[in-house]
Image (spheres, rainbow, N blue to C red):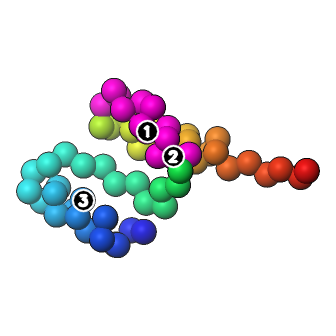
Amino acid sequence: LYGGTPSNSAARLARLGTLVRCVSALNLPMLLRVMNYAELDLDALPAVAAAGARNGAIIDDA
């Protein structure tokens, strides 16, 4: 959640000079996608996470 403890911790790290990018509403497909593309640079990873969200949400009418 944006504004929750992980978000606040990332903001604190950013204020200390650490390069961070925050993505809120993270789900498992997003996390797995980022972990599979961990070699990409930090600026590319938020888009990779968003792609995981788009491709990970499936409606199964079975």
User: Residue 14 vs residue 37: left or right?
Assistant: left
Query: Which residue is at the front of the view, 37 or 3?
Result: 37
Instruction: Locate the N terminus and report the quarter of the image it occupies.
Output: bottom left
Please name the residue that numbered disc 2 is placed on.
Answer: 30
Query: Which residue is at the front of the view, 18 or 36?
Result: 36
Query: Which element carries disc 3, helix, strand or loop?
Result: helix
State which region is magenta: 29-41
Q: CA distance from mark 3 to mark 1?
A: 17 Å
Q: CA distance from mark 2 to mark 3?
A: 18 Å
Within 10 angstroms of label 1, few (less than 14), some, or many (20 or more) residues? many
Q: Pointer 3 and pointer 1: residues touching (CB < 8 Å)?
A: no
Q: CA distance from mark 2 to mark 1?
A: 6 Å
**Residue 28 magenta:** no
Please state which amino acid type lies under the numbered disc 1.
Val
Residue with the most extreme top position: 39
- Mark 2 and mark 3 lie on one chain; the one further toward the N terminus is 3
Q: Pointer 2 and pointer 1: residues touching (CB < 8 Å)?
A: yes
Please name the residue that numbered disc 1 is placed on.
Answer: 34
Residue with the most extreme bottom position: 4
The residue depicted at 89 percent of the width and 52 percent of the height is 61
Query: Which element carries disc 2, helix, strand or loop?
Result: helix
Please state which amino acid type lies under the numbered disc 3.
Ala
Using the rendered image of the protein, determine whether residue 45 is visible from the camera's viewpoint: yes
- The secondary structure making up most of the magenta span is helix
Please name the residue that numbered disc 3 is placed on.
Answer: 10
Using the rendered image of the protein, determine whether residue 50 is visible from the camera's viewpoint: no
Relative to 14, does residue 38 appear above or below in the rendering? above
